[in-house]
């Protein structure tokens, strides 16, 4: 099978789309783009390509080593097994959901993934804010089960490329809502705006890559509401357009916390969720959301709603 990287063929379309959105923003939403922010996003994309080439070799080796122990074998012409492609794409997207969720819930992985959330603007150039240090978190190991099932590493890479291409277009405010049937199944700009928001109701929600059904299945879905403006970025904003600080700031913060923490807490600063502290001086996303729910009464409203549903169900059963 000849080498094929779908992303490289999509790059010209990315450029055209960004330029088109810039023109739209000039007349409809001037605040959507900020020149320095856009430049940092473009440099992120360039740097991640170089970093992937330099650091991705171990992942390739690991995949091909694991492939020797595959449970099922599709034969030497695995690329011609037509049904394997949609199955691989769906399973790869499920894998993406979990590695993405881990990237928000494990600080070591968040140190790399935070790069993608560091912009306070939300536009197509934001999609280019890809990590330089992702391979250091070993997130690629989430794909090893697919390799062991018999999907060739090249097949997985191609499906992952198409997954990445799909996610590009959802980084925009130019599209408000897609048709209801589409919003129900697929990830959309509306769903992904929620994911990039720092509003308490939205923190750590909507991890999906292509299919939003994973979030609905695993309880991490929250819809966008029209009466609350979205604030983008991270809980503690960078406050700088310094590229190197944007890339490495969380690694610096995490290592600093580990060095200063008592021995019994050092590993927790590596593996627990971002915002966790042994002395309670900081807040995790769960704490921020819980405080917001308590302040707004939303938590009580949800509990009452569930209680009402249970009472109705009980009455129906009794009848």
Image (cartoon, rainbow, N blue to C red):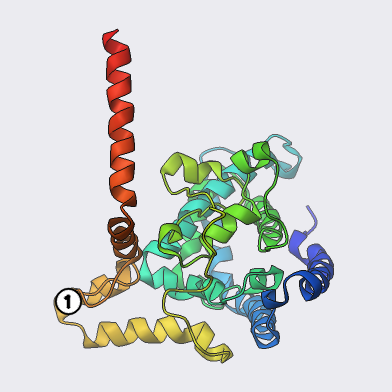
What secondary structure is marked by label 1?
loop
Q: Residue at x 28, y 46 (%)?
A: 300
Kindly identify which residue carries mark 1. 279
Q: Looking at the picture, does residue 258 appear above or below residue 233?
A: below
Q: Residue at x 56, y 92 (%)?
A: 242
Please tell me which residue lies in front, 258 or 189: 189
Q: Image quadrant of residue 175?
A: bottom right
| Image coordinates for residue 246, horizontal then vertical, percent | 52, 85
* Residue 288 shows in the view: yes
Point out the image quarter for the C terminus.
top left
Please tell me which residue lies in front, 233 or 66: 233
Q: Looking at the picture, does residue 123 appear above or below residue 145?
A: below
| Image coordinates for residue 40, horizontal then vertical, percent | 64, 84
| Image coordinates for residue 70, horizontal then vertical, percent | 52, 44
Q: Image quadrant of residue 312?
A: top left
Around disc 1, counting alpha carbons within 10 Å, would you say few (fewer than 14), some (14 to 19), or many (20 or more)? Answer: few
Q: Looking at the picture, does residue 145 appear above or below residue 57?
A: above
Please tell me which residue lies in front, 287 or 69: 287
Q: Residue furthest top?
A: 319
Q: Looking at the picture, does residue 82 appear above or below residue 7?
A: above
């Amino acid at each position: 099978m000849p080498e094929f990287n779908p992303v490289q063929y999509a790059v010209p379309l990315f450029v055209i789309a960004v330029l088109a959105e810039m023109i739209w923003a000039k007349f409809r939403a001037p605040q959507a783009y900020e020149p320095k922010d856009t430049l940092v996003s473009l440099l992120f994309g360039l740097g991640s390509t170089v970093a992937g080439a330099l650091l991705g070799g171990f992942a390739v080796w690991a995949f091909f080593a694991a492939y020797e122990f595959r449970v099922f074998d599709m034969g030497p012409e695995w690329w011609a097994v037509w049904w394997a492609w949609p199955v691989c794409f769906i399973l790869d997207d499920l894998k993406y959901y979990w590695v993405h969720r881990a990237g928000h819930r494990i600080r070591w992985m968040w140190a790399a993934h935070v790069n993608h959330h560091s912009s306070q603007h939300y536009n197509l150039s934001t999609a280019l804010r890809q990590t330089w240090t992702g391979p250091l978190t070993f997130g690629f190991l989430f794909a090893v089960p697919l390799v062991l099932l018999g999907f060739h590493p090249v097949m997985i890479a191609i499906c992952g490329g198409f997954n990445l291409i799909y996610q590009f277009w959802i980084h925009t405010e130019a599209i408000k809502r897609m048709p209801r049937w589409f919003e129900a199944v697929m990830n959309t700009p509306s769903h992904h705006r929620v994911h990039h928001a720092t509003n308490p109701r939205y923190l750590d929600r909507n991890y999906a890559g292509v299919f939003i059904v994973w979030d609905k299945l695993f309880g991490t879905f929250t819809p966008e509401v029209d009466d609350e403006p979205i604030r983008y970025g991270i809980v503690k904003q960078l406050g700088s357009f310094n590229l190197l600080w944007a890339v490495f700031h969380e690694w610096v913060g995490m290592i600093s916390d580990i060095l200063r923490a008592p021995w019994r807490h050092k590993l927790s600063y590596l593996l627990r969720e971002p915002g966790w502290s042994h002395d309670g001086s900081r807040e995790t996303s769960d704490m921020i959301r819980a405080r917001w729910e308590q302040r707004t009464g939303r938590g009580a409203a949800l509990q009452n709603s569930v209680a009402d549903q249970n009472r109705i169900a009980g009455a129906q059963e009794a009848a």
